[in-house]
Amino acid sequence: MDKLLQQRVDRIFDNIEDKEVSHIIIKNGNEPFVDQTFFYLTKVTSGIFEQSYVIADRDSKITLVTSILEEESARKTDLNIEIYKTKKEKNKILESVIKNTKKIGFNSTEIDVESYMDLKKQFRGTKFVNISDAIKNARMVKDKEEISNIEKAAKMASLTFKDIKNSISEDKNANESSLSALITYSMMKNGASGPSFDTICAMGKNSAEPHYTPHHNKLKKGDLILCDYGAKYNHYCSDITRTFAFHADRKMEEIYEIVLNAQKEAIKHIKNGVKSSDIHRIASDIIDKSIYKGRFIHGLGHSLGLSVHDGFGVGPSSKIVLEENMVITVEPGIYVPGIGGVRIEDDVVVTKNGCRIITDAPKNWKDISIT
Ligand code: GLY
Ligand code: MN
């Protein structure tokens, strides 16, 4: 069986404090109860796998339990596959895979209550132990294959820069929704399976709202255009923000340069062993020393992986110490209500002595300013 998958299972078990937990069960439900750990432990790259399970034990044996609907997709892996047609069959399979156990680990943050109650009923007398922290810890540091997937997703997102800039420069009817659609199209054209989250495209004063939802607002002279988007590749996410300026004034350039400086300084200090809260503070101190004090209103970034927000945040109260092969975003911003906002976001892989920036879209004022 796949060595990397076995290592992933071992990493989770190593992080479980209760050594009596002999099996872990991951249930992948219907949206929104998708558990990305299901994909972490199977590497399936095709199929939705609703109502499917992955069961792993301390001998690193992994069993994928799924319905006949996903059989073809499941057979592309070299895992142990168990296929069910009915609920009764599914229950029988679960009981045959999980035998002689006192304690089963489950992921409380992703499973729906009904599924959890069903499992408890089915395995009466067996204790269920919440292992969500162990899963988060295991997934925090990425292996080679995960980094390669994220790097590809980062490249696909970075390549859209040209298409966005052309659209702002040439499309007289460009609006927030049309630009969002173009971003998704461009990323998929570059190889993405889809966007990693709903694209944020905010023009003018709307860009002062960090998680703005695009509407049909038309581009006009003097606008800042904040585009926050990411590509998905083999279930892995990238996340990038570029803010463009369309016939913008000097004040906007000033805001832009402060954010860019804050981002570059923070990136300079990222390396194995550094507290993530310190990295946040480097950027927030730069912004708070300017006339935009208090206008950086969110954390500097977050872990990135199978989920866009993949476990921990990089903020003032984050307890995480950076480790080699963690992947994080660095995304300071300044938001001025009534005028607009600037955010610049890149994805980086933490290394022993620094970090590697994996999103490579241009970000100097001359690159993003369109006149
Ligand atoms: N890309 C949106 C966020 O990181 O919050
Ligand atoms: Mn982000």
Image (cartoon, rainbow, N blue to C red):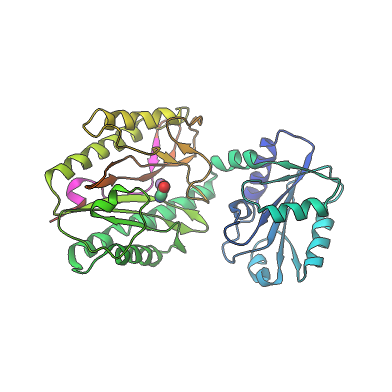
Task: Report x, y in % for residue 139.
Answer: 57, 43
Which residue is more in the foreground, 56 or 331?
331
Task: Report x, y in % for residue 352.
Answer: 45, 32
Which residue is more in the foreground, 326 or 109?
109
Total tally of numbered discs in the picture = 0
Indicate the quadrant containing the N terminus: top left, top right, bottom left or bottom right.
Answer: bottom right
For the point 83% across and 51% down, the residue is: 123
Residue 163 located left or right of residue 276: left
Q: Is residue 86 above or below residue 154?
A: below
Q: Is residue 203 above or below residue 288?
A: below
Task: Report x, y in % for residue 93.
Answer: 81, 61
Q: Is residue 130 above or below residue 272?
A: below
Residue 99 located left or right of residue 112: right
Q: Is residue 362 located in the magenta-colored stretch of the structure?
A: yes
For the point 48% across and 42% down, the residue is: 303
Which residue is more in the foreground, 334 or 280?
334
Task: Report x, y in % for residue 5.
Answer: 64, 50
Q: Which quadrant of the structure image shows residue 128?
A: top right
Magenta highlight range: 355-367
Indicate the quadrant containing the C terminus: top left, top right, bottom left or bottom right.
Answer: bottom left
Q: Is residue 321 located in the magenta-colored stretch of the structure?
A: no
Q: Which quadrant of the structure image shows residue 298?
A: top left
